[in-house]
Amino acid sequence: MYFIRRMAVKPLNLLVLCFALSCGSNNKKCTSVDECRCTELRDQTSVANCSDLMLKSFPNFNENVSVIYLNNNKIQIGKICPRLPKNLRRLYISGNRIWYNGSSGLCFIKNLTKLEILDISNNVDFKRKATFPSADFQFLEKLTTLFIDGLWGGNFNGNGWKSTRMTNLTIGGRKGKCYFDRLHKDFFSGIRNLKFLTIRGCWSLRSIDKGVFRCLRLLHTLDISFNENLKFAPLQNVSYDLQFTKVQIFRARRLHCFNGIGTYLSKRDFAYFQNTSIKQFDLSRNRIELMDMDVPQYFPMKLEILNVSYNQFIWGTYLLSYHFLRNLRVLDARGQYFFKRGITDVLSCSNYLDCEEPSSNPVNITISEETDNFTFLVPRKLEKFYFHSSKFSFSIQEINFKENHIKEYNLQNNIFHSLDGPIYGMEHAKFVDFSGNFVKYISPFFFKTVSNITHLNLSGNLLGNCLNQVEENDHFHALIRLIEIRLSNNEISTLPPKLLSNAKSLQILDLSHNIITNYIVTLHDSCALRYLDLSSNRLRSISRETIQRLEKIQKLNNLSVDLSGNPLDCTCATIFFLKWIQSSEINFIKKNAYQCRFVNSRKRTFIDLSSILNELNHDCFSHLPTTISITVSIATVFALAITFTLYRFRWPIRYFYYLAKWDIIKIMNPTKQNLQKNYKYSAFIAHAEKESIFVESELVYHLENITGRKLCLPNRDFSPNLRTYANVATAIHNSKKIICIITEDFLKDYWCMYQLQMAEEDRIEREDSDYIVFILFKSLTSEQLGGIHRSLFLFSLIEKRSYALFPEHEDARPIFWRKLIDTVQ
């Protein structure tokens, strides 16, 4: 407390302390340049970030600096070689002028024996024939990762390079530069332990010799993308070399220019890929239009992920050969026809094509609107299929997929204007996306064979008219396992009464950005709905019936509802709706941003919902007609009078009701005897549940087993064919005596008090003062009798007639039982 009080008196001290605690560890100076940002690591070394400071030379660094960022400056190497910390582990110096005018200038790395990562890319500004200064790298014993530009005469052959630790090499890259035009056989012979090799952005690269990658037996990932003058021809040599490596990922994106006429993929280019261990293959952005029918058979046998997106495939018989890819799990064919024909690239890329004849004549397949059905051969292990954003325009008629395990279909942003179906072979489908396809019509039978779908996206279509015209059918009746469905942006104005009524597992329903004016819950009351999106529609309020349905769903789930962006009304007719939003336990998304409009067109947000309701209550109820208030008052008084009368005489009414019912039954069934003269039971036992042992052992033994009298026990003798109240009235009416076991539990039990009330009504009818027999285990005070409303009734009964106290000592109990037996004669 003393410390806090002193700080409160001197706030400047607190500010200084906070600054010292929070900033001291990160603002220690680690370089000679004040603008550099220094951060201390857990191993007590520092990171010096001096990027983007327009520096022209190396700063001086403290010896504990282990990571240095000098990207995007103007650093040149002078006559005096700069000295860097010996413990440096990472050095990033891309985007400078280290190789300015052809000088190598890498003397600063010679003593960095602990360096692990070095980025010196984007430092070359010339195209003259120069080589990498391999001598400068010989002392980097721990170097594992290198980012470097591609020099015209540079290579990594065994004559100057003997690196055994380097596993990651990136030449050129997105930000780097690359000038060599050929990869000769021994190009990487000095760094044989490479696992990850990237050669990108080499505009001059046109050929790759056989044997270039054969020496890299540990190679895991090879990326030769964005070499737009390389074309497909060198893939034959590349595939040959990769047979002798452990490569699993191969990327060959954009080996052709971005724009131009379509390209052709020959099986000659893929001659040896089937013998490799590649699992991921990327051929995207190559303007592939057609390929030999046999090409899919030459894909790697272990291939799991194939990316042929952003090409411009036409239908051909090669599409029927993909079933050979037995291990394929993911097929990405999105973005077809993304390119423009006949337009050369802005970077003057050479757009020549190979002029050799195709090794086989591809046969085109035509899919038209008149096609009745079509059968696709699908890889059996395929799980995900991406075919979105491809500008294909046709209606989906009956389609058959051969045996497959596809779970995810991404078909959005095409032009599938009609979904007629049905589709067979999609039994394993769970995620289906048809959004943004301008779909105008869905057949009621389209989804009948895909009952396992859990997530369906149909947003961004034109399904309003199709759904509005349906009254009896539910397009999604078969989707019994549906968890999420999105129908936003479909111009829906009304919902069919049976829409999604069978989707009991539905949790997310998105109807946003439509033109719905009256939302009606069409879901089952026991559905699993958790999120309902009605935002940006034309709702002015929600009906009372819909509110009740939503509240039922809320009791089962934690429901969230989004009503934002609707033109809600603030009028006398919508007060109930506004009060519901204020008091409901439903989570209304963005509730404070809701707006409602008054009669005079004035708008207010729901951040003032309480004041809105107060204003409406004052305006709507202060001028009600006097006749309505009088009518309500009279009706209230009349209802209260009836209620009071019924409550005052509730016991006689109940008793005579069941007695009359019993007499009517006897009249309607003349075979039954008149049981009022010859009683069926000697006594009816009224007791609390806790006294069941005493009744079923002591009373039954002395009154039934010894004397032969018959008792009526509720737990034993009540008829299952009659309601409980009728059982009590019938049993009391057919019993000669009523024995009440009075205990504290008896007085607290509503059921016991009801039996006593019925017995008293029957006693009045019989005019028998000894009809009810009371047995007490001990004398009870008025407090123990459960309050004034019960003690007055019991005292009035007990005072008028005798009662028996059950003896505490066993010696006196024989006399008690003898007197009780005489009473029940």
Image (cartoon, rainbow, N blue to C red):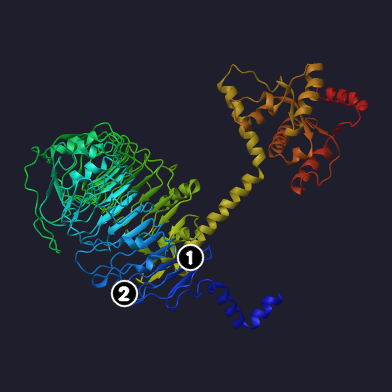
Instruction: Say which residue label 1 marks.
Output: 626
> In the rendered view, would you say 258 is above or below 660?
below
Query: Of the residues shown, which amino acid type is indicated by label 1?
Result: Thr
Where does residue 408 sit, x and y in percent of width and height?
31, 42
Where does residue 273 sit, x and y in percent of width and height?
23, 40
User: Which quadrant of the figure has residue 80?
Assistant: bottom left
- Mark 2 lies on a secondary structure that is loop
Query: Of the residues shown, which amino acid type is indicated by label 2?
Result: Gln
Where does residue 256 sit, x and y in percent of width and height?
16, 54
Say whether residue 342 is left or right of residue 211: left
| Residue farthest along the front direction in this orientation | 159
Residue drawn at (40%, 70%) of the image: 604
Instruction: Say which residue label 2 marks.
Output: 76
User: Which quadrant of the figure has residue 299?
Assistant: top left
> In the rendered view, would you say 306 is above or below 640?
above
Where does residue 184 sit, x and y in percent of width and height?
20, 51
Q: Local crowd at mark 2 within 10 Å, few (<14), some, or many (≥20)? A: some
Q: Earlier in the sequence, mark 1 or mark 2?
A: 2
**Whether residue 518 can be seen here:** no
Separation of residues labelled 1 and 2 (CA atoms)? 95 Å
> In the rendered view, would you say 295 is above or below 131?
above
Residue drawn at (60%, 25%) of the image: 720
> In the rendered view, would you say 628 is above or below 293?
below
How many marks can you see? 2
User: Is 143 or 423 nearer to us in this picture?
Assistant: 143
Q: Local crowd at mark 1 within 10 Å, few (<14), some, or many (≥20)? A: few
Q: Quadrant of the C terminus?
A: top right
